[in-house]
Amino acid sequence: MAQTTMTYDDVMRELSMRKFHPVYYLMGDEPYYIDKISNWIAENVLQPEERDFNQTVLFGSDVNASQIADAAKRYPMMSEYQVIIVKEAQNVKNIEPLEKYFKAPLSSTILVMCHKNGKIDGRKKEYVKAIQQAGILFESPKLRERDLPGFIEGYLKAKNVEIDHKSTQLIADAIGADLSRLTSELDKVILSLPEGERRVVTPQVVEDQIGVSKDFNGYELRDALVNRDVFKANLIVKYFDENPKSGNIYSLLPLLFNYFQNLMIAFYCPQKTNQDRVAEWLDLRGGWYAREYMTGMRNYTGMKVLQIISKIREIDAKSKGLDNPNTPPGELMKELIFFILH
């Protein structure tokens, strides 16, 4: 019986031990982990000289379920395994032949189904059950914005690289939850660091390698608003207005909305004066991450936060042209910042 609750680390641990399953059904909205698992299988199960006859890549839009099942029933040639990777598995039609195959798969075939941008229709319970009986049903959900700092720190730690909290947040705010792009940028940062000594990512490194200003960015704007620093907030907004590629209303509004939405939730924490309890209440990684919410609760009332959330929604609508024929994005952003601080 398959372990359907296996994490990415669990799957990779088994693969590294060469404990293989006949079926890997990889699905979800985050393609990064699906690609990592399928690429590992493609590059490591077979020896290079075995791949010509025993490794096949198919596309769900080009083949049907019967063709996939027939390919999976073949025996390997002069090899312990054959590997079949089906990309765009979400496009495979008429799945009955595959369901039948999953109920009695060949142990010498490793069939990898890559189903991106979604998951199996919940009504196909027998199909899901057959996959679970045959091997691994792995779901790769989209990473939440609040989990990005932990992902960045963990990725760098695995490569013996340190990073401070500000740099972590700068990268998270600038890149977002596209893990393929995020890891590519992190790899670029790692390559820029000197070898043979303690390697640390600082705000200056982030500015040099990713192009995010260490002084004028979404993180600094949020910090200025949290601390009600009127001068700094207006300085940053003026900079963004003059340099729209560095920050614009469309990237800043979600950042501010997420903060004030969480701040509103923090007011309902039973122990809102305890930093660790607030972190738990907001599902943050630790007390340090609750500091800006502790400061926010001191500097804003619950009523003001409600009004700010409403104002952000209004500005968001106006930025998309609703009830706003003429006001440019820069002016809308200035209007929002003034409302928040006064």
Image (cartoon, rainbow, N blue to C red):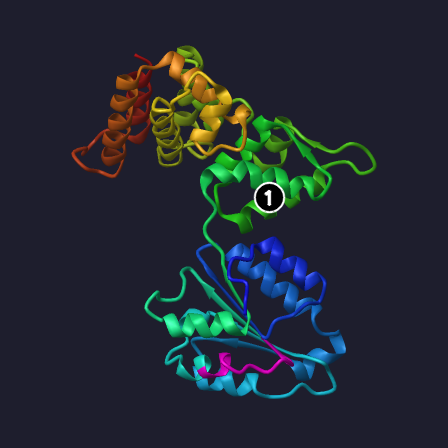
| Residue type highlighted by circle 1 | Glu
Q: Position of residue 27 (x, y in %)?
A: 47, 62
Give the number of marks: 1
Residue 63, can we see it?
Answer: no
81 relative to 189, above or below = below
Label 1, residues with CA under 10 Å away: few <14, some 14-19, many ≥20: some
Q: At x 51% / y 24%, what residue is drawn?
A: 276
Observer-nearest of 193 and 241: 193
User: Can you name the residue that lies furthest to the right here?
Assistant: 196
SS at mark 1? helix
Rendered view: 158 above or below 85: above
- On the rendered image, what quadrant is the C terminus found in? top left
Q: Which residues are magenta?
A: 100-110
Q: Position of residue 107 (x, y in %)?
A: 63, 80
Q: Quadrant of residue 263?
A: top left
Does 106 lie within the magenta span?
yes
Give residue 282's position: percent from left, percent from top.
Answer: 43, 31
Give the residue drawn at x 47%, y 30%. 280
Compared with 183, 309 (above or below) is: above
Decide whether residue 246 is among the magenta residues. no
**Visible residue check, residue 305:** yes
Tell me the residue at 49%/83% (across/down).
101
State left or right for residue 17 relative to residue 131.
right
Q: Quarter of the image holding residue 73? A: bottom right
The residue lying at 42 percent from left, 20 percent from top is: 271
Residue 243, how many percent across, how many down?
44, 29
Q: Which residue is mark 1?
A: 185
